[in-house]
Amino acid sequence: MINNSVADILLVENNPSEAAVIRSAILQNKSASKIHWVKDGDEALSFIFNYEKGKLDIHIPRLIILSLNIPQVSGLEVLQKIKAHPSTQHVMIISLLSPPGELEMFSDAIKAGSNICMIKSPDCKEFVRKLKEELGYYWKVFE
């Protein structure tokens, strides 16, 4: 079963303060969005590929904002699993990397199917501005 109504946006971020900043940027762009926040890759995959009573119940958000540096299952592995499944391969994914992250992770993320890659700026205002800009492009294309 495929369920499209659970969340418009899945936010995968283990840092609560960064998650709050990202949520704020999302809500400033699209106030009606339903946002579901998870803190690691295992939670993200469990949310999307939910096995309920032995049956697969796939939750497909319209957008996934995915930190690549997350615990449990890596962000790159989450991205690969989402893009490998026929029901979720079309989902737009914005991949985030914390500085001074390994920039080759961006190359791997693009190869795995990430639509946008961004570095989380230590300057909170600058990061929010860039994220809002990317989200603005997203809403114009997909609404």
Image: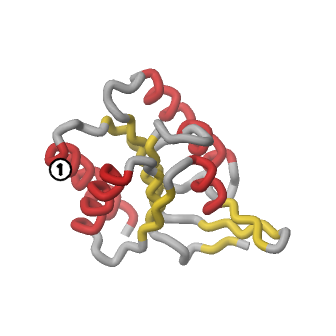
x and y percentages locating residue 93 in the rendered image: 46, 50
Quadrant (top left/top right/bottom left/bottom right) for the C terminus: bottom left
Quadrant (top left/top right/bottom left/bottom right) for the N terminus: bottom right
x and y percentages locating residue 110 in the rendered image: 48, 34
Outermost residue to the front: 16
Using the image as rendered, state which of residue 100 and residue 105 is in the foreground. Answer: 100
Secondary structure of the residue carrying tag 1 is helix
Residue name at image x 54 percent, y 49 percent: 40
Picture quadrant where residue 79 is located = top right
For the image, the number of numbered tags is 1
x and y percentages locating residue 106 in the rendered image: 43, 29
Using the image as rendered, state which of residue 8 and residue 120 is in the foreground. Answer: 120
Picture layout, residue 17 above or below residue 5: above
Picture layout, residue 106 above or below residue 117: above
Residue name at image x 39 percent, y 23 percent: 103
Amino acid type, residue under disc 1 in the picture? Arg
Picture quadrant where residue 54 is located = bottom right
x and y percentages locating residue 6 in the rendered image: 54, 74
Q: Where is mark 1, residue-wise?
A: 129
Residue name at image x 61 percent, y 46 percent: 83
Say whether residue 85 is left or right of residue 33. Answer: right
Using the image as rendered, state which of residue 72 and residue 143 is in the foreground. Answer: 72
Pointer 1 local density, CA inside 10 Å: few below 14, some 14–19, many at least 20: few
Residue name at image x 67 percent, y 66 percent: 58
Using the image as rendered, state which of residue 60 and residue 21 is in the foreground. Answer: 21
